[in-house]
């Protein structure tokens, strides 16, 4: 569906285009560029997300439900690799994951109104929640070594998440958010990570503090990344080519 802000749509299909249409498009792209050695990877879908009460939401489990992103990612990877078996397959996460340890599941509402503001879900940035990988890793079969999980991570200037509402440190970020959401994948050698988006305003404040902590964590743990963004026209983050940098 043509949409200048298409990433705001939670899923890889809608009322106009089906999952099969998405798979056909991935296959076409992979075939068209298979002899172009500058195309080394495909990110299957930008920022799958959504909450239970949104009506459309991406989940991550062992089912073949159409909104199960883990299952869809395996289908998408096959569509690409059937055309070009040399590609890296970048798989982002989702937004929320149920607190199964507290008795919640994918049928739980987004908010526990009886105990407001408690949420029955572990939240995350869009495309960032990989808690489901522990039990339901993406399976690419003979191409498993070409799988790269790709979380997005942002700072306080994009949204004041709960893990920023304290004098945060690397350790508090790990404890409150990073580790169980995506960092364990690298720490436990489950698969390679590429932080597909991170960045923000150099504000000499909390946002810059978060950027420096994440930068150092990636260096210390040999995690690759792509920075958002180069041009300064992102309202959330600004860009490197900004007048403040000369």
Image: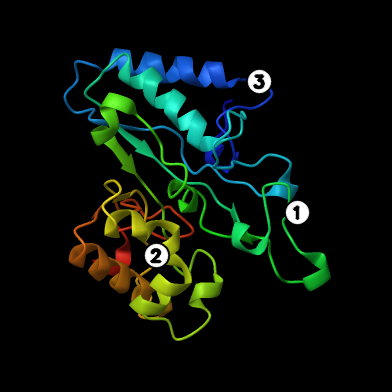
The answer to whether 238 appears left or right of 227 in the picture is: right
Q: In the image, which is nearer the foreground, mark 3 or mark 2?
A: 2
> In the image, is residue 35 above or below residue 225?
above
Mark closer to the observer (3, 1): 1
| Neighbourhood count class around disc 3 (C-alpha, 10 Å): few under 14, some 14–19, many 20 upward | few
Residue at the spot of label 2: 179
First along the sequence among labels 1 and 2: 1
Q: Would residue 238 be found to the left or right of residue 214 on screen?
A: right
Please give the label number shown on residue 161.
none
Q: Say which residue appears at 83% left-offset and 69% top-offset.
A: 114
Q: Residue furthest left?
A: 37
Q: Rate crowding at label 1 as few (under 14), some (14 to 19) or many (20 or more) other CA atoms within 10 Å.
A: some
The foreground one among 1 and 65 is 65
Residue to which mark 3 is pinned: 16
Element on which disc 1 rests: loop
Q: Is residue 194 above or below residue 114?
A: above
Q: Are marks 1 and 2 in contact (CB under 8 Å)?
A: no
Q: Reading the chain from its start, which is encountered first: label 3 or label 2?
A: 3
How many residues crowd around disc 2 within 10 Å: few (fewer than 14), some, or many (20 or more)?
some
Which residue is denoted by mark 1 in the rendering? 109
- Residue 216, above or below 26: below
Q: Disc 3 on helix, strand or loop?
A: loop
Q: CA distance from mark 3 to mark 2?
A: 37 Å
Quadrant in which residue 88 is drawn: top left
Q: Percent x, y for residue 10?
A: 60, 40
């Amino acid at each position: 569906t043509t949409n200048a802000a298409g990433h705001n749509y939670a899923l890889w299909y809608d009322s106009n285009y089906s999952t099969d249409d998405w798979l056909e498009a991935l296959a076409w792209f992979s075939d068209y560029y298979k002899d172009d050695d500058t195309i080394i990877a495909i990110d299957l879908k930008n920022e799958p997300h959504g909450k239970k009460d949104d009506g459309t939401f991406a989940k991550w489990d062992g089912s073949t439900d159409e909104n199960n992103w883990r299952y869809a990612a395996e289908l998408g990877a096959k569509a690409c690799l059937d055309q070009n078996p040399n590609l890296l397959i970048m798989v982002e996460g989702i937004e929320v994951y149920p607190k199964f340890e507290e008795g919640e599941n994918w049928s739980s509402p987004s908010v526990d109104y009886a105990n407001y503001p408690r949420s029955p879900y572990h939240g995350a940035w869009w495309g960032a929640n990989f808690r489901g990988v522990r039990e339901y890793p993406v399976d690419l079969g003979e191409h498993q070594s070409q799988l790269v999980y790709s979380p997005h991570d942002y700072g306080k200037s994009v949204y004041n998440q709960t893990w920023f509402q304290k004098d945060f440190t690397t350790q508090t970020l790990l404890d409150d958010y990073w580790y169980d959401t995506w960092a364990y994948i690298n720490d436990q050698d489950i698969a390679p990570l590429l932080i597909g988006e991170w960045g923000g305003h150099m504000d000499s404040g909390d946002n810059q503090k978060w950027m420096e902590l994440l930068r150092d964590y990636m260096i210390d743990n040999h995690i690759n990344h792509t920075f958002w963004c180069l041009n300064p026209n992102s309202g959330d983050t600004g860009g490197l080519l900004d007048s403040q940098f000369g």
